[in-house]
Amino acid sequence: MSAWTLALELSNPTSGSVVAPLTSLAPLSVVAPLSVVAPLSVVAPLSRAECASSIALGQVENPGTPHACATIIDTEHVAPALPRSTSDDLFPAIDRLLRRNGLSPRDLKGGRIAVSVGPGGYTGLRIACAAAKVLADTVGASCVGVPTALVALDADSGSAPGGTALQSGALRAVALSSKSDAAWVYVEGWADPAAPRFITVETAAAFLAEYRIGLLIADSFLPAPIRAACAAAEIVIAPPRLSAAACVRASATLPDIDPVALVPIYAREPDAVTQWRARKEKD
């Protein structure tokens, strides 16, 4: 059994790789547009201004089983919204991708909408999940929530260009949502890639040694003391190469869920909530 899979990667727009060029086609007519800010995708080196928001179309054999196998059919870049613009490119990008492959949104009926659900940027995660729910409900597809750490690991594996070789017994880890003196971390092989776990500048060295980390996938926001701990332990730090194609592959063995159950993974509460809470405590 095979199923169409449409994947959305909007979680961390400052990381990624090159995707297909834009073409000019009409926007989707089956859903209402959403506002999305998605900066351009570029090749390394990466910076705040460099980004990777993309979508991908794939076929997955035996989806949701250990024997699943994904084939990437095509990818499409999601362009940035102009400042103060009320338009966006997410649904037009989906339309371009489907039309280029002779499909319409309704061909996704019975298929899967896979979303890189974080941790990552709050706005990108909320928009991707909302868009997936609307599209899945409209066409009769299911959703798949893909932890972004699994997307990053797939993009670094042998199935993607530039896979990083490790010493025997060493593991890979992914650090996301780095802020101040801490980072959210997932180590490959852990049972639940959605469970929250943090390392701090105080615990990093012990953590890296305990789990025999050989490669840490992390962006430029990784705290300097944690970078120093990696350097001292001769651990390679590689930038995340997040892409919708990797999201398709990472989604293959994961179960379908009802669109209502699709939610982002937030590493911490938004700054606005933290500031509101602090003000309430002073009152």
Image: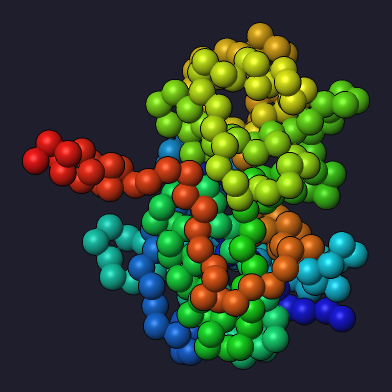
Task: For the C terminus, give its image quadrant.
Answer: top left
Number of marks? 0
| Outermost residue to the top | 232
Which scheme is used to colour this image of the protein?
rainbow
Q: Please tell me which residue lies in front, 192 or 216.
A: 192
In percent of width and height, residue 82 lies at: 32, 60
Q: Is residue 71 in sight in this rendering? A: no
On screen, residue 219 above or below 274: above
Q: Please tell me which residue lies in front, 91 or 213.
A: 213
In percent of width and height, residue 211 lies at: 74, 25
Task: For the N terminus, give its image quadrant.
Answer: bottom right
Q: Is residue 189 in sight in this rendering? A: yes
Residue 171: name its quadrant. top right
The residue sitting at 48% across, 73% down in the picture is 131
The residue sitting at 43% across, 65% down in the picture is 127
Q: Please tell me which residue lies in front, 159 or 172.
A: 172
On screen, residue 239 above or below 55: above
On screen, residue 74 above or below 52: below
The residue sitting at 73% across, 57% down in the picture is 250
In percent of width and height, residue 16 lies at: 59, 46
Residue 43: name its quadrant. top right
In percent of width and height, residue 107 lies at: 67, 88
Residue 20: name its quadrant. bottom right
The residue sitting at 28% across, 48% down in the picture is 273
Direction from residue 189 to residue 222 in the image, left or right: left
On screen, residue 192 above or below 117: above
